[in-house]
Image (cartoon, coloured by chain):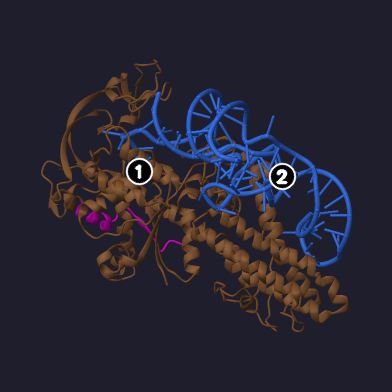
Chain colours: A brown, B blue
RNA sequence: GGGCCUGUAGCUCAAUUGGUUAGAGCAGAGCGCUCAUAACGCUUUGGUUGGGGGUUCAAGUCCCUCCGGGCCUACCA
């Protein structure tokens, strides 16, 4: 039994996530967590909310709430929606947890002891009206290059020129609009990633099986220009992990917090401790997942994230771990995703464009979304959501191919034999051929999943569903029944067993529908098949079942048009 | 500007890493079936693989060049 540690990039706290966020991290992570559990592996699936940083403070201010209260509420909202989407986290933590505070401070202390922290005096723009330092992109002004009057302090969106905030003409706060800005000196800690460059380079180069998207981004950062740059890991903010060197105060750093990107990945570890603490377990329980000196040597660690997260997971976080000099578990495989676009443009949290997780669930059950998103996951390039494509895929794949199969088998059985697995008859060449087809199909499906090819896995799964319809059409029990009811009984007995087989294999993609199928055929047997012939005898003659309701209702043209119109604008 | 990804049937994507006649799903056409959510099955139309050049016995795949789309570029996260 393998041990699999899975982390999803942790969603930011400032609002409900859209489907693009979901498909890039939490949903594929859940797919593999469910798959590995089904295969009998021991799985630890960790996610959390990412709660620190300037946008969180601003979102709380906008909501008129204290930041701690805002985060607690939003964490609850996100946890609830994740649950409704069937995201099967073993723990959904918070980066603001005491566990993460302690661990982040611990890592900083270790890095400082190793000579990997540098104190740097630098100049930052301070807004008197806002009472805070402003990150570069929160400063607006006129671009000195092209004259665009809404250029940001990091870059002009109009002419794409990279800028320094002090380059801007008539600079003002993007938060309040105030031009009462001044440049102040402030001291910050830098992580000396450059000293670990060669070690990171060797490590990345050893990962020849990672997605190109992952390694190419890492290599770019490692080798671009002067190579990997040192990175500031503290900020002048109120809300965050206070800067400490282990348990000790850090002279000169009073009132400052660690940068959100320093503490966020550490939360993967801290959230596992949160899990152990919540269950009343001791440190050994979480350390066996994370400490290679305490049992994590045989753990396979998989990370899931959108491409914007890749530099932090391939370089900064590994630098933190390697630099600590302690035997923490490094990631074994990073599955990264491109972006999902919405109907000709980008999903946008800040602009409220696209479909958000709560809205999606208002319209349709989670499985509809899970299936479409996973079968169209942006693995090789950015992909696009359109309502027409969504309607077609869901109606054909889920309603017609899978749902209708369950329906035709159970209803035919009820009308001819009653709601019970019929007895009699024997299997012939058609049944043997089907078992061969399914055996091959199962192997293909597992191979895709083991290689973490999400789209191909969905195609392979669909092919397995199709095989059932092909068999039924060829066997034609409705015709056979008239002359040879025993043979028809054997055909339907096999077909009813196929429903269980499909439920088991499909559960990672569509867990709710899978549970309904199992419930209808009245079994708790979810054992992953190793021998297809044996798996298709799990339900014996005489086993009672109940014809289920329609598994997947079709999306009508009217529905589609209504939703298309409803989601054409921006979220209020 | 630099880097990376991408361009294959009307649409969404494959192609065992250079190897037979480029394949699936959807959409279209025809036939079959009547158990089923007007569902299912079979057959079939559809391609100068973005353009051009090169390497090779052999190129969708490698090289050069041009064109289109996208992403990243280190203080948003």
Q: Position of residue A129 (x, y in %)?
A: 27, 28
Side of A435 relative to A102 (left or right): right
Q: Residue furthest left?
A: A251
Side of A402 relative to A314 (left or right): right
Determine if the magenta segment contains residue A100.
yes
Question: Considering only vertical position in the picture, is B77 above or below A104?
Answer: above
Q: Position of residue A248 (x, y in %)?
A: 12, 52
Query: On residue A558, which mark appears?
Result: 2
Q: Earlier in the sequence, mark 1 or mark 2?
A: 1
Question: Considering only vertical position in the picture, is A98 above or below A336?
Answer: below
Determine the chain carrying the residue at label 2.
Answer: A
Side of A228 relative to A524 (left or right): left
SS type, badge 2 = helix
Q: In this view of the protein, can residue A427 be seen by the observer?
A: yes
Q: Please state which of residues A425 and A374 is positioned toward the viewer in this rendering.
A: A425
Side of A491 relative to A533 (left or right): right
- Total count of labels: 2
Query: On residue A311, which mark appears?
Result: 1
Q: Which residues are magenta?
A: A88-107
Q: Nearer the viewer, mark 1 or mark 2?
A: 1
Residue beneath the point at 74% across and 83% down: A423
SS type, badge 1 = helix
Determine the chain carrying the residue at label 1.
Answer: A
Alpha carbon distance from label 1 to label 2: 44 Å
The crowd level at tag 1 (other Cα within 10 Å; few <14, some 14-19, many 20+) is: some
Q: Tell me which corner region of the image, top left, top right, bottom left or bottom right, holds residue B54.
A: top right
Query: On residue A7, which mark appears?
Result: none
Q: Please state which of residues A125 and A206 is positioned toward the viewer in this rendering.
A: A206
Q: In this view of the protein, can residue A563 be seen by the observer?
A: no
Q: Position of residue A215 (x, y in %)?
A: 39, 45
């Amino acid at each position: 039994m393998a041990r699999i540690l899975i982390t999803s990039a942790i969603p930011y706290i400032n609002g409900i996530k859209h489907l693009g966020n979901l498909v890039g991290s939490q949903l594929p992570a859940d797919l593999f967590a469910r798959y590995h559990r089904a295969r009998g592996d021991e799985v630890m699936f960790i996610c959390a909310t990412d709660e620190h940083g300037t946008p969180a403070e601003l979102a709380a201010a906008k909501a008129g709430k204290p930041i701690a209260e805002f985060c607690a509420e939003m964490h609850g909202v996100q946890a609830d929606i994740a649950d409704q989407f069937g995201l099967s986290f073993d723990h959904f933590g918070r980066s603001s947890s005491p566990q993460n505070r302690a661990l982040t401070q611990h890592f900083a202390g270790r890095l400082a002891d190793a000579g990997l922290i540098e104190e740097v005096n630098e100049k930052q723009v301070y807004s008197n009206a806002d009472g805070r330092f402003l990150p570069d992109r929160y400063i607006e002004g006129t671009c000195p290059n092209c004259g665009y009057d809404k250029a940001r302090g990091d870059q002009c969106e109009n002419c794409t020129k990279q800028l320094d905030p002090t380059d801007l003409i008539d600079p003002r706060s993007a938060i309040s609009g105030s031009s009462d800005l001044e440049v102040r000196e402030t001291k910050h800690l830098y992580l000396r990633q450059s000293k670990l460059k060669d070690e990171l380079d060797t490590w990345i180069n050893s990962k020849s099986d990672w997605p190109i998207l992952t390694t190419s981004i890492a290599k770019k950062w490692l080798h671009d220009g002067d190579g990997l740059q040192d990175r500031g890991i503290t900020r002048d903010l109120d809300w965050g992990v206070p800067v400490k060197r282990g348990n000790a105060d850090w002279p000169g750093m009073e009132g400052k917090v660690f940068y959100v990107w320093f503490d966020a990945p550490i939360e993967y570890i801290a959230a596992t401790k949160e899990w152990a603490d919540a269950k009343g377990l001791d440190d050994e329980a979480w350390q066996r997942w994370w400490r290679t000196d305490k049992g994590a040597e045989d753990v396979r660690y998989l990370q899931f994230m959108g491409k914007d997260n890749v530099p932090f997971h391939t370089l900064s976080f590994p630098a933190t771990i390697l630099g600590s000099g302690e035997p923490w578990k490094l990631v074994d495989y990073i599955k990264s995703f491109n972006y999902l676009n919405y109907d000709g443009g980008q999903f946008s949290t800040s602009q409220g464009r696209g479909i958000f997780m709560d809205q999606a669930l208002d319209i349709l059950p989670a499985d509809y979304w899970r299936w479409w998103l996973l079968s169209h996951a942006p693995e090789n390039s950015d992909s696009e959501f359109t309502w027409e494509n969504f309607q077609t895929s869901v109606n054909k794949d889920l309603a017609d191919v899978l749902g209708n199969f369950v329906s035709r088998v159970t209803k035919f059985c009820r009308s001819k034999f009653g709601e019970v697995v019929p007895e009699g008859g024997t299997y012939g060449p058609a049944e043997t051929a089907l078992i061969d087809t399914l055996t091959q199909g199962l192997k293909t499906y597992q191979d895709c999943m083991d290689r973490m090819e999400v789209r191909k896995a969905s195609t392979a799964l669909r092919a397995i569903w199709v095989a059932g319809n092909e068999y039924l059409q060829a066997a034609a029990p409705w015709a056979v029944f008239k002359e040879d009811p025993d043979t028809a009984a054997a055909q339907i007995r096999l077909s009813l067993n196929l429903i269980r087989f499909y439920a088991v294999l499909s559960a990672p993609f569509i867990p709710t529908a899978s549970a309904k199928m199992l419930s209808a055929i009245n079994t708790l047997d979810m054992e992953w098949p190793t021998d297809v012939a044996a798996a298709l005898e799990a339900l014996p003659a005489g086993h009672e079942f109940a014809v289920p309701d329609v598994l997947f209702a079709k999306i009508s043209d009217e529905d589609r048009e209504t939703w298309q119109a409803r989601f054409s604008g921006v979220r209020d």
